[in-house]
Image (cartoon, helix red, strand yellow):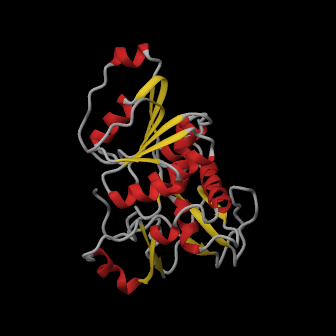
């Protein structure tokens, strides 16, 4: 995807506050030096129409951590640096001592996004749920959906190792090359692949809901039969980024889940900044996240 250059990349992280202007966390506590915090990926104005409607992630003047030019008014926006400047309009959540740094850092993008996706999915108790795409978001979604009382989670991915991780969490694991998920009440599309989007929509039963969150870059189009959609009372919706409450929910989820996710199989590292280039050139397949310590 195109991005400004030069810029400080990285939008999913955790840090220790070294100075504060007295801002508050999502929970209302004053941000004080010495506190470990995670932070939202978006910075919003709070005044535009989307902000007033509660969609601050779609602020008309939104800025994003790790996405801003070094020549802009927010040069220290990314996590691949020793310091990051958190701005007004950016969510901040304190991290409990029980959470390790690498685990807590995932709250800032992957886990918070999943919380937003599940909010759009609605009630999950007793439902049959399809999760397509088992990257970081997909595995978190499997665990969170099961935690919320789903009757069954069907997890789909072409990668056998990721299917094994999902199976270990309690999902029915399925390769798209060998089977179909059947009819579901809710489908969560987290891969962005057009084929995955299509399968998530086609799997919806009567009254079903598909939440699409993986399609964040151009990847082609699909066809949808509007009559089938209307007569079946089916819903298709999208989620991109998240709201401050979802960041708090993400931290709470990670704290409640504890070791419920196989972190040893998810997190690589930690590595130092001077090892980052070599990390991108590895011959083997790294885990879903590599912890970078600055």
| Residue 197 rendering spot, x and y as whole percentages | 34, 38
Q: Residue furthest right?
A: 29
Q: Is residue 48 visible?
A: no
Task: Give the vertical position of 11 relative to 52 (above or below).
Answer: below
| Residue 74 rendering spot, x and y as whole percentages | 47, 66
**Residue in the image at 32% along x and 63% along y:** 4
Q: Answer with left or right where residue 23 lies relative to residue 211.
A: right
Task: Give the vertical position of 164 relative to 216 (above or below).
Answer: below
| Residue 232 rendering spot, x and y as whole percentages | 44, 17
**Residue in the image at 60% along x and 50% along y:** 246
Q: Quadrant of residue 148?
A: top right
Q: Is residue 118 visible?
A: yes
Q: In which quadrant will I find the N terminus?
A: bottom left
Q: Answer with left or right where residue 81 lies relative to residue 255.
A: left
Viewer-proximal residue among 41 and 202: 202
Viewer-proximal residue among 150 and 16: 150
Q: Quadrant of residue 238?
A: top left
| Residue 92 rendering spot, x and y as whole percentages | 63, 61
**Residue in the image at 52% along x and 40% along y:** 152
Viewer-proximal residue among 70 and 152: 152
């Amino acid at each position: 995807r195109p991005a400004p250059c030069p810029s400080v990349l990285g939008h999913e992280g955790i840090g220790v506050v070294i100075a504060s202007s007295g801002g508050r966390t999502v929970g209302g506590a004053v941000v004080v030096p010495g506190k470990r915090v995670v932070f939202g990926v978006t910075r919003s104005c709070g005044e535009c129409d989307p902000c007033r409607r509660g969609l601050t992630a779609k602020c008309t003047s939104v800025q994003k951590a790790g996405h801003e030019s070094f020549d802009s008014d927010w040069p220290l926006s990314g996590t691949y640096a020793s310091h990051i400047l958190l701005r007004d309009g950016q969510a901040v959540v304190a991290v409990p001592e029980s959470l390790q740094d690498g685990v807590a850092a995932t709250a800032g993008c992957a886990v918070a996004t999943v919380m937003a996706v599940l909010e759009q999915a609605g009630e999950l108790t007793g439902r049959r749920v399809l999760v397509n795409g088992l990257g970081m978001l997909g595995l978190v979604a499997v665990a969170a959906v099961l935690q919320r009382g789903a009757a069954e989670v069907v997890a789909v991915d072409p990668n056998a190792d990721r299917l094994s991780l999902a199976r270990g969490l309690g999902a029915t694991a399925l390769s798209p090359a060998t089977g179909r998920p059947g009819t579901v009440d809710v489908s969560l599309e987290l891969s962005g692949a057009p084929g995955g989007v299509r399968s998530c929509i086609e799997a919806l039963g009567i009254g079903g809901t598909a939440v699409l969150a993986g399609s964040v870059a151009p990847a082609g189009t699909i066809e949808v039969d509007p009559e089938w959609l209307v007569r079946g009372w089916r819903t298709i919706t999208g989620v991109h980024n998240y709201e401050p409450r979802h960041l708090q929910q993400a931290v709470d989820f990670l704290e409640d889940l504890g070791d419920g996710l196989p972190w040893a199989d998810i997190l690589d590292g930690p590595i130092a900044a001077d090892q980052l280039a070599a990390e991108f050139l590895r011959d083997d397949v790294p885990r879903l996240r590599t912890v970078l310590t600055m």
